[in-house]
């Protein structure tokens, strides 16, 4: 088994303890190959997320609109989370969606939040904000950075919606021929 100088191994960058606990032999060849077998790589990541609380059928989060007055109130009245991961500390405690609604948080376009008994934490950047659920925590357990977790969530949504395909390449234009003098 080969890994980086810090011990992270394979495409999934598992530490040895994570390899032992979560690596999968999805293709059934008798090896848990997180280096070069895509089926094992993706199954191992899925097993890791499942082991860290991923709930099938539940979303990771959603983009929301937080008007300036609401942001000020939230910053003053809603506690931040605790944890060893900086990203966890850079988000609010989880509150019911009804509470977020009463604080002025809306879906984009000023649409109301859905009626649900889910609790969510607020992650706010300089330009965008998201209400995130427990599946987001599972992603942060994998890589504790909002830039990573938000990218994974948004890419997953785009793939599920069928909009994450690469645009078709433009046909090449024939090269112009220069006239010989």
Image (cartoon, rainbow, N blue to C red):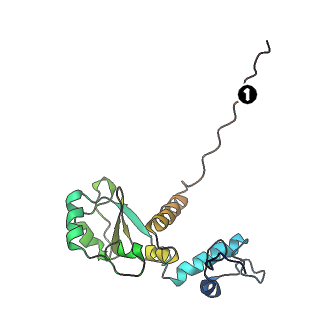
Image quadrant assignment for residue 146: bottom left
The residue lying toward the viewer, choosing from 82 and 113, is 82
Residue 107 versus residue 1 in the image, above or below: above
| Horizontal arrangement in the rendering, residue 166 relative to residue 86 (left or right) | right
Disc 1 residue crowd, few under 14, some 14–19, many 20+, Cα 10 Å: few
The residue lying toward the viewer, choosing from 161 and 105, is 105
Q: Secondary structure at mark 1?
A: loop
Which quarter shows the N terminus? bottom right
Residue at position x 41%, y 68% in the image: 61
Residue at position x 61%, y 81% in the image: 15
The residue lying toward the viewer, choosing from 176 and 98, is 176
Circle 1 residue = 175
Q: Position of residue 3 (x, y in %)?
A: 67, 77
Is residue 158 shown to the viewer in this render?
Answer: yes
Image quadrant assignment for residue 2: bottom right
Q: Residue furthest top?
A: 181
> Number of labelled discs?
1
Which quarter shows the C terminus? top right
């Amino acid at each position: 088994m080969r890994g980086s100088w810090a011990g992270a191994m394979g495409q999934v960058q598992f530490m040895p303890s994570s390899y032992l606990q979560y690596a999968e032999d999805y293709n059934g060849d008798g090896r848990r190959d997180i280096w070069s077998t895509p089926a094992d790589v993706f199954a191992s990541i899925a097993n890791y997320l499942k082991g860290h609380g991923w709930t099938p059928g539940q979303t990771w989060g959603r983009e929301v609109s937080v008007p300036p007055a609401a942001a000020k109130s939230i910053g003053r009245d809603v506690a931040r989370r605790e944890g060893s991961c900086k990203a966890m500390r850079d988000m609010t405690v989880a509150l019911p969606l009804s509470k977020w609604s009463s604080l002025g948080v809306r879906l984009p376009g000023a649409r109301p939040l859905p009626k649900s008994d889910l609790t969510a934490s607020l992650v706010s950047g300089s330009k965008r904000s998201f209400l995130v659920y427990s599946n987001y925590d599972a992603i942060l357990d994998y890589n504790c950075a909002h830039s990573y977790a938000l990218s994974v969530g948004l890419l997953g949504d785009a793939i599920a919606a069928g909009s994450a395909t690469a645009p078709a390449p433009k046909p090449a234009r024939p090269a112009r021929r220069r006239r010989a003098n």
